[in-house]
Amino acid sequence: MSTVCDLLVIGAGPAGMAAASTAARLGVSTLLVDEQAALGGQIYRNVESHSNDADGVSAADWQRGAALVREFRASGARHRAGTQVWQLDPAQEGACKIYVTDGTQADVIRARRVLLATGAMERPVPIPGWTLPGVMTVGAAQILYKTGKHVPQAGTWIAGSGPLLWLFAAQALEAGGKIEGILDTAPRSNFAHALRHSMAALRGRAYLERGLALQARVRRAGVPVIKDVAAIEAKGEDRLTTLRFRVGGRWRDVLASTLLLHHGVVPNVHATRSLRAQHRWDGPQRCFVPVVDAWGMTSAEAYAVAGDGAGIVGAEASALRGRLAALESARRLGVIDEQRRDTEAAPIRGDLARHMPVRAFLDQLFAPRASLLAPADEVLVCRCESITAGRIRDAVRLGCAGPNQMKAFTRCGMGPCQARMCGLAAAEIIAHERGVGMEEVGVFNVRPPLKPLSLQELAALPE
Amino acid sequence: MTRETVTVYVDGKPVSVGAGESAAAAALHAGLSYTRTSPVTDEKRAPYCMMGVCFECLMVIDGVPSRQACMVKVAAGMRIERQIGARELG
Ligand code: FES
C-alpha cells in the first residue's frame, strides 16, 4: 500500500501541528506522520490525555499544546501515528518518496513536498560512567512522567544546565517526586556574558520571569542547588551507586541511585543530513543546523525544515516557523499566490519578532561548560561501539581529520544509533585536538536506513 | 485522570503498566536493573533517552530481537525480555 499527498509533514510537535493545520486550511492535501502514539511531540507529549497538567507549572504550555491539537483536528489534515521514517529520497520528477514503518510493516509515502518538523534532542555530553544503568537524561525522566506519571524517587540527583532542567525539577517536585540535589554545571561567567544581550532579552521578559519562578520553586522545596560544578562522574559496578562531583576545586562523593543529565537541546539533524542538505555551525548554540531561508526552505529541493530542527527557538516560535514554512510550501504547490502568502505571513512574523530576541541571552546563560566538552581519555564517547575519547584523540594524531574518517580508524559512529549520540561530541574532540573550527571538522554522513529494519518489515514494501 | 492499565511480562514476570507507556518504561517499572548488555564489551546498559535516539533500549519483544523498546507501545500480554549481546533484527 502506498500513500499519496501534496505535503507530508514529519513530526507532530508544535511546528509540525501548526504547519499541517495551516497547509490543510489553505486547501493543501496534508498528511502528518509521527513516531509517537499521540499528537504533541516531546514538549506537548500526551497533551490530550494529560489533564493533570491543566494547572501547575506547565499550565500555559499545556493550554498552548491543547489549542494546537484542536486546531489540527479541525483542519482536515490527516494524521498517521506510530510511524517512523527510515529513508527520505531526493525529489524526482516533482515527487519525494518517503519510506516509513509502523514497526511491523514498511510502507512508502509519495509527497510533492516535505516539511521536516523533527525537533530537538538533548545534547549528549559524555561523562565518566554515563553508560551505567541508573544514569539517564532529564528528558527521559520527563517522558516517564508525561506518559505514566512516574516521578523521581529518593536517591535521584540532577546535573547539567538548561531551561528544561529547571522545568522538570519543578514539575517533578510538584507531582510529589524526590530530588536529593541539583548540580548546576553552567559556569559562573555565563551570566556576565549573557548580560550583553540583556536589553534584547527584556523584550522577552516572560521567558526570564518564568525561568526565575521555576528556580525559586525548586529552592522553596528545600532542594540543595550546588552552583558552578566543574566535573561530574557516575560510579558503580553494574549500576550507579555513587555520584562524584568537583566544586571549588574539591571532589565530593554522594550516594545516588539515579542521575539525570541535561546539557541543553540541539536540533535533530539526522533527516536533513541524510538528504545531504547544507548545514552550518551555529557558534552560540554550539550545534550544526540546516541552512534555511526566511521560509524554512532547505538546499534540498522540495524539503523544508521548521521548529527546533532548524535551530533552537522554543515551542512557541517553533509553531510560528511551522506556519511560515507551510505558507511557502502552499505557494510552491501553486495553492496560494505570493500576495496571499505575504499577507498571511505578516502577523506571524510580528509574533516571531517577540520570541526571538531572548534567544541570544538564553544561549549564553545556559552555554555548556567548555571543560565538559573535552572529556578525559578514558571516557566512553561512542556508546554503541564503546569508543573512548582517548581513542578518538589517538586517531587524530594518526591523521584523522573528521568524523567520517573516524569510522575507518575506530568504528566510532558505526553502531545502531548511527552517531546520533557521539557525532557532536566526537566532532568537538577532533576540533579541539586539531585546533580548528567545527565547520572544518564537519559531522558524520548519514545513510539510510535511518533505523534498523527487519526482513519481515521490508517484505511488506510495495514493488 | 482514569488510568487504563495492561499486563505485560517483563522477563516472565507480570507487571501492570499504563496503556500509553512504552516497553522500555515497563521494563524500568518492573525494576529490571539493566535491559541489555553491550555486544562489544558485555557491559550492562539501560534505556538512556527514552525518545528513540540512543538505541540503548534494544530488547527482545514478543520474540523479536533488537526492538527499540522506548518506541514500542505496550500491549496486553506483551513479552519484554532482556537482550544479551548482539542480536540481528529478525
Ligand atoms: S532509550 Fe534511547 S532509543 Fe530507546
Image (tube, helix red, strand yellow):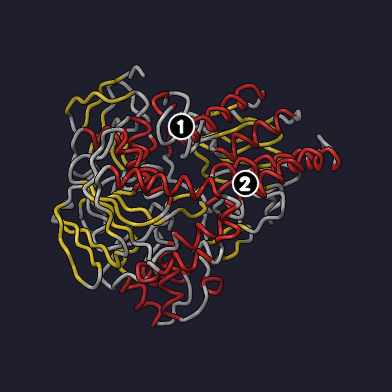
The image shows residue A350 at horizontal and vertical percentages of 71, 45
Q: What residue type is labelled 2?
A: Ala
Query: Residue B42, which numbered label?
Result: none
Q: From the image, which quarter does the C terminus of chain A lie in? A: top right
Q: From the image, which quarter does the N terminus of chain A lie in? A: top right
A428, A222: nearer the viewer: A222
Q: Which amino acid does label 1 sit on?
A: Ala
Residue A385: quadrant of the picture = bottom left
Residue at the location (74% across, 31% down)?
A28
Q: Earlier in the sequence, mark 2 or mark 1?
A: 1
Q: What is the crowding at mark 2: few (fewer than 14 residues within 10 Å), some, or many (at least 20)?
A: many
Residue at the location (68% across, 37% down)?
A111
Image side of residue A15 versus residue A294, left or right: left
Asked if the residue under mark 1 is in contact with the one under mark 2, i.e. CB atoms within 8 Å, the reply is no
Q: Is residue B90 visible?
A: no
| Chain of the residue under label 1 | A
| Chain of the residue under label 2 | A
Question: Foreground mark, 2 or 1?
Answer: 1
- Quickly name the residue at label 1: A59
Image side of residue A158 versus residue A244, left or right: right
Which element type, helix, strand or loop, lies under badge 2? loop
The image shows residue A99 at horizontal and vertical percentages of 56, 40
Which element type, helix, strand or loop, lies under badge 1? helix
- Distance from mark 2 CB to nearest ligand 1 atom below 8 Å: no
Q: What is the crowding at mark 1: few (fewer than 14 residues within 10 Å), some, or many (at least 20)?
A: some
- Quickly name the residue at label 2: A306
Q: Spatial distance from mark 2 to mark 1, Cα to Cα? A: 25 Å
Residue at the location (18% across, 36% down)?
B31
Image side of residue A239 versus residue A452, left or right: left
Q: Is residue A448 visible?
A: yes
Is A445 placed above or below B25 here? below
